Image: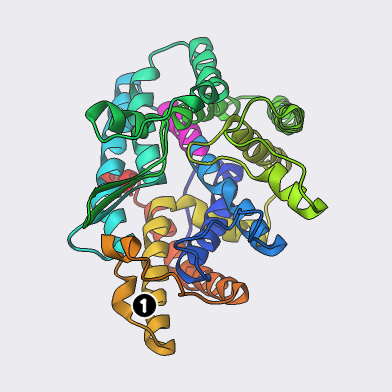
Amino acid sequence: MKITTTRIESIDILRGLVMVIMALDHVRDYFHYGSFFSDPSNIETTTPILFFTRFITHYCAPVFVFLAGTSAFLYGSKKTKPELFKFLLTRGIWLIFLEIVVNNFIWTFDFSYSTQLFQVIWAIGFSMVCLSFLIYLSKKILLVLGIILVVGHNILDNIIMNGQSFQDIVWYLMHQQKFLVVKPDHIIVLQYPVIPWIGLIILGYLLGTFYQKGFDIDVRKKWLLRLGVGLIILFFSIRGLNVYGDLIPWSTQDTMTKTIFSFFSLSKYPPSLLFICITLGPSLLFLWMFDSIKNKVTDIFLVFGRVPLFYYFLHVLLIHLLAIGGILIFGGNWKDMILTADVFMEAKLMNYGYPLYIVYLIWISVILLLYPLSKKYMIYKANNKNKWWLSYL
């Protein structure tokens, strides 16, 4: 069936690539030894392959949020400002609803919602709501605002709240990751504080200028190259000074490997300036490199990149079901994979898990299983643009 679309392929290819990588991180969450209670970036306990497995997946969230802004700009280039405002506002609210109701359930399978997670879908949704109002500002003001939020938010790192008052919770949502024990059978994980994510979606929105109809391709590629290289240089320069840009400074360790781990151990919750530099820089270089490249490999990533929300929910559901299946086959209590609050509070999955090579095998299997479904939905979506509700899925 022929696909009719005017989408920018390089953007969808990059989005698809990071979404495939994202599945690796989520498979690791559900299958690797001790993944529910250990940090794969802990320099005292990690290994090079485990550290790399975690580090490469750092690209997913910032690229996802950044390109959400770019897609918003491209959508708005064919609409009036009020139409774009309505779309961003309603889609943002829809994503927040999906996070709280649908995403929480497929991550936990807990009908009581005793474990509530605020993850990347929440961050994108809230950022879209904010962007819906900000689109009325000039591009210069947006650029300044985006840079301030991304570059300056680490100034707030030393503000630490520990209570559960309204003001405390607002701060957790804005800038401080928090694991809240509301009561023994109810926990809330505020994992994606939104201040830097709002800045990132604003900058992604402005990137859309390079992709509007009639924009010179050579000029676009020149800027993508400059910005990509510039961000990487900025990362190494600021990280080397070790005085700003991340919550945790790096330090010389007793081995070179551990020192490298320390240097590249960056704060994601919220994403630090340095975290954004080292993830966004190479991503812009990818857009520069693949601006006009198309082959069978990119076609695979293109499929996932054009149905991001469909793929996201489906891959989490599949991974969670496979994890339950694994427990049933190899022993253990499958009910422990129903992630109620007591599973975390009582550390029931402390000794659960499989070797890392199993994680990679399951990851590949998940991608192979989801590709045909994603492709069918991509074709359906591309050829039914008259159905407005598809833009929300």
Tell me the crowding category of disc 1: few under 14, some 14 to 19, or many 20 or more residues within 10 angstroms, Cα based. Answer: some
- Residue 8 x/y as whole percent: 56, 41
Residue located farthest toward the right when viewing the structure as drawn:
256
Against 177, is 376 above or below?
below
Taking the spot 56% from the left edge, 72% from the top edge, the residue there is 359
Taking the spot 40% from the left edge, 62% from the top edge, the residue there is 316
Visible residue check, residue 44: yes
The residue that label 1 is drawn on is 324
Visible residue check, residue 128: no
- Residue 206 x/y as whole percent: 53, 24
Q: Is residue 89 magenta?
A: no
- Residue 183 x/y as whole percent: 21, 51
The quadrant in which residue 342 appears is bottom left
Helix, strand or loop under label 1 = helix
Nearer-the-camera pick, 65 or 294: 65
- Residue 182 x/y as whole percent: 23, 47
Question: Please, what is the three-letter code of the amino acid marked with disc 1?
Answer: Ile
Q: Report the predominant secondary structure element of the magenta stretch.
A: helix
Residue located farthest toward the left when viewing the structure as drawn:
112
Taking the spot 62% from the left edge, 24% from the top edge, the residue there is 215
Q: Which residues are magenta?
A: 67-77
Taking the spot 53% from the left edge, 74% from the top edge, the residue there is 362
Q: How is the image coloured?
A: rainbow
Whether residue 63 sits left or right of residue 167 in the image: it is: right
Nearer-the-camera pick, 377 or 47: 47
Against 297, is 12 above or below?
above
Whether residue 281 sits left or right of residue 92 in the image: it is: right
Whether residue 5 sits left or right of residue 387 in the image: it is: right
Against 154, is 298 above or below?
below
Against 333, is 314 above or below?
above
The mark total stands at 1
Nearer-the-camera pick, 174 or 218: 174
